[in-house]
Image (cartoon, rainbow, N blue to C red):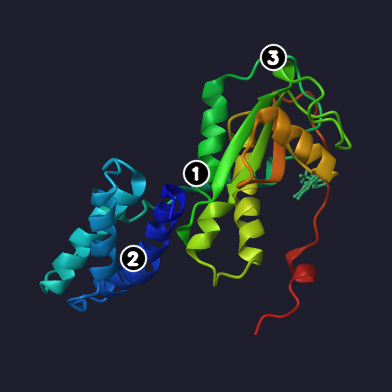
Amino acid sequence: MDETEFRARFRERCHHTLEIQVYSNAYRSKSLRPDQDKTVQMFLEVWRMRNLPEDLPEFVYANTLLEMARTLIDGREVDLSPYRPQPVSSGELRAFERIVYERRSVREWTDEPVSDEVIKHVLKAGLWAAHACNLQSIRYLVVRESSAPGLFCGSDIPGGPVHIVVLQDMRVYRANPVMPQSNQLLDAGAAAQNLVLAAHAYGLGGCWLTFTSEEMKERIRREAGLPEHYRLTTYVDVGWPDQTPFPPQRLSVEEAVFKIL
Ligand SMILES: Cc1cc2nc3c(=O)[nH]c(=O)nc-3n(C[C@H](O)[C@H](O)[C@H](O)COP(=O)(O)O)c2cc1C
């Protein structure tokens, strides 16, 4: 098993064999089965045998969970209070609403350069989206139009100065073959939604776009030298906005809800 699949399996096993049980029991001050941590312990052993770095996120997370599990197994309380979210103030709530409701698909951009720093903030938000089984398939290809003019031609608009392709490392899905396949696309959708929201929050204008043909994807794959295990799932263009569209109106909640039982 290659390292990517191993790490994804580790994330998935942590999630399904320990994380859910630890939090459920910690909140109810219940002990944990003495062997509840055995799968994660086994993965940690293999991690060490493979000489993988101990500062990678899976390793850090697994150790934190194991510490909590040990505490519960020993019949002690786990203090989760440091992780309790602070209440959202009314000003923060207003900011959240502005980001959600004032975000627009922006399709024209100024020539002002977009720094790597602001792009990284946006990419990070995509990685923090919910992800099925915590498999974390999301990867990116970032292409500045100036460095590859016309590479993204084919969409219905010329596109922005920065193209963010949401890739998915399909090797991670081997870690959980029983997961419904539809979750794979939803993982990318969740990430892309965070990208457009974050772009807006950082003052950028973004537009979620469509690969209109396989030829377009193949052209980008070839040019970027992307290996086969990366799927080009969708993409978002960003830049400094040069238009302020009127919001395309949405259905009301009343119209959208079929039924509340
Ligand atoms: C999956 C997806 C694909 C999209 N593809 C395109 C596209 O190819 N071209 C485009 O101009 N806008 C595209 N959009 C943006 C939508 O047109 C836009 O979100 C919608 O009209 C609502 O407008 P708003 O984003 O300003 O609220 C896409 C959005 C999504 C979610």
Q: Please, what is the three-letter code of the amino acid marked with disc 2?
A: Glu
The residue singled out by tag 1 in the image is: 92
- Helix or strand or loop: what does disc 3 sit on? loop
**Local crowd at mark 2 within 10 Å, few (<14), some, or many (≥20)?**
many
Disc 2 within 8 angstroms of ligand 1 (CB)? no
Q: Residues within 10 Å of mark 1 (few under 14, many from 20)?
A: few
Distance from Cα at disc 2 to Cα at disc 3: 45 Å
In this rendering, the answer to whether 220 lies above or below 64 is above
Residue 182 lies, in percent from the top left, at 66, 65
**In whole angstroms, how far apart are the C-alphas of marks 2 and 1?**
29 Å
Number of the front mark, 2 or 1 = 2
Of residues 77 and 88, the one nearer the viewer is: 77
Q: Residue at x 24, y 51 (%)?
A: 49
Q: Is residue 149 above or below residue 36?
A: above
What residue did someone put label 2 on? Answer: 19
For the point 77% across and 23% down, which residue is it? 109
**What amino acid is found at the position of numbered circle 3 in the picture?**
Glu
- Residue type, numbered disc 1: Glu
Q: Position of residue 42 (x, y in %)?
A: 25, 63
> Front-most of 250 and 21?
21
**Ligand 1 falls in quadrant:** top right
- Please report whichever mark, 2 or 3, sits nearer to the chain's N-terminal start: 2
Q: Report if the beta carbon of the residue with label 3 is closer than 8 angstroms to ligand 1.
A: no
Q: Which residue is mark 3?
A: 112
Q: Quadrant of residue 54?
A: top left
Residue 4 seen in the current view = yes
Residue that lies at the very extreme toward the front in this rendered image = 1
